[in-house]
Image: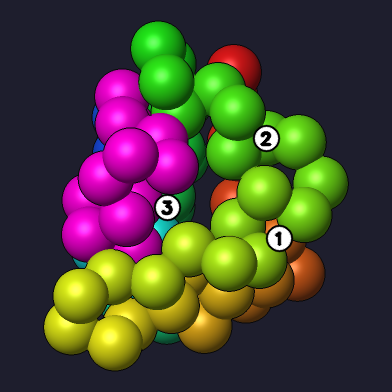
Amino acid sequence: MEKFLFVLTRGLEDPTRVTRTFQLAKVAKESGSEVHIFLTDDAVLLAKPGMTDHIKAPTGDEANAYFPYLLENKVPIYV
């Protein structure tokens, strides 16, 4: 089993990085890997309930397409 630690330092000002981080974490978890996410700097705001609800990357991807999966599958998120 592979282990992944995703460190996210960007928040609402960078929806592409936020969305992509959650997307890659979801893919890793679905493949059976052990996944952890560490939020630091501006990303700490994302730990507040509802903050990911309106994050949309210019590509059209939305953070909430991935974030609820991570919560439901008990991926540890450190702040």
Q: Residue furthest top?
A: 41
**Disc 1 marks which residue?**
71
Q: Secondary structure at mark 3?
A: strand
**Figure check: 59 above or below 54:** below
**Number of other residues with Cα within 10 Å of mark 3, as a class: few under 14, some 14 to 19, many 20 or more:** some
Q: Secondary structure at mark 1?
A: helix
Residue 69 showing in the rendered view? yes
Residue 53 x, y percent position in the rendering: 66, 66
The Cα–Cα distance between marks 1 and 3, rounded to whole angstroms, is: 14 Å
Horizontal arrangement in the rendering, residue 65 relative to residue 2 (left or right): right
In this view, the residue in front, 58 or 36, is: 58
**Disc 2 marks which residue?**
47
What number is the disc on residue 39?
none
In this view, the residue in front, 20 or 2, is: 20
Looking at numbered disc 1 in the image, what kind of residue is underneath it?
Leu
Residue 61 x, y percent position in the rendering: 33, 83
Identify the residue shown where x is 40% and y is 12%.
41
**Disc 3 marks which residue?**
34
- Residues tagged 2 and 3 counted as in contact (Cβ below 8 A): no
53 drawn magenta? no
Of the numbered discs 2 and 3, the one sitting upstream in the chain is 3
**Number of other residues with Cα within 10 Å of mark 2, as a class: few under 14, some 14 to 19, many 20 or more:** few
Please report the bounds of the magenta region as a residue range.
Answer: 8-19
